[in-house]
Image (cartoon, helix red, strand yellow):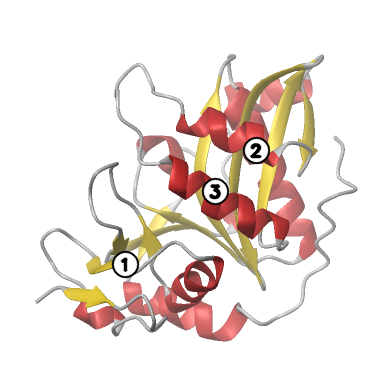
Amino acid sequence: MLTWLNRNNLDFPPLEKALREPDGLLAAGGDLSADRLIKAYRHGCFPWFQDGQPILWWSPDPRTVLFPEELHISRSLGKVLRQCHYRVTFDTDFARVIRACAAPRSYANETWITGSMQNAYLELHRRGHAHSVEVWDQEELVGGLYGLAMGQLFFGESMFSRADNASKVGFATLVEHLTDWGFVLIDCQMPTQHLHSFGARSIPRQTFADYLSRHLDQPTDADWLSRRV
């Protein structure tokens, strides 16, 4: 039976209570307050819902992740990175990045990054938990992504691209820096061909939960604001 959350209680049900169909649906309701979102990621779940639906919280099994040391750069992307004319920055324009990620795609008219979701992650950014990667062609924002950093874990949320390979360049650059900073895992949430091409793979939900318990409170050398590539 699906658990409905109380707005006055930030607790989530145990991950093993998540439904098998639809895979990983753990709870519904609650709100998108910064405190609840932080509690959710620390617990191992994330919000994902369409406009007009109740807030839905997910913890799929298996979980798609990328271990930074397993990043795969294809020959073609390697050539792009060597010859790249793009400029990559971190935390320069979080608001524009999340708005761009929320824009309708050619293959889908609706977006799950609703206005309330954007406001929630903007608050997480103001608190220092959510971060953005911007990819620039001169002064034009052509790609980027955003997610949360907690301890030695990065939780990827969404990316966008308006030019050839822009999001790929941004993601590869991010992973390179996360590796240098001592991050051990990138949460990719759900499987996609795009992420698998970078070396992402699926692990059991319990294994993911074990990583949370071991690495959420561990320090890193992250230095987001000084990054200009």
Mark 2 or mark 3: whose residue is earlier in sequence: 2
Q: Quadrant of the C terminus?
A: top right
194 and 18: which one is in front? 18
Answer above or below: position of 174 versus 84.
below
Comparing 140 with 210, the one in front is: 140
Estimate how packed mark 2 is, as few (under 14), some (14 to 19) or many (20 or more) residues with alpha carbons within 10 Å. some
Helix, strand or loop status at disc 3: helix
Outermost residue, front direction? 8
Q: Which residue is mark 3?
A: 119
Q: Quadrant of residue 139?
A: top right
| In the image, residue 73 above or below residue 199 | above
Label located before the other in sequence (1 or 3): 1
Q: Residues within 10 Å of mark 3 (few under 14, many from 20)?
A: some
Image point (83%, 66%), residue name? 221
- Asked whether the beta carbons under mark 1 and mark 3 sit within 8 Å of each other, the answer is no
Q: Label 2: which residue?
A: 95
Q: Which residue is drawn at the image coordinates 49% and 67% (left, top)?
A: 37
3D distance between C-alphas at marks 1 and 2: 26 Å
Amino acid at pointer 2: Ala
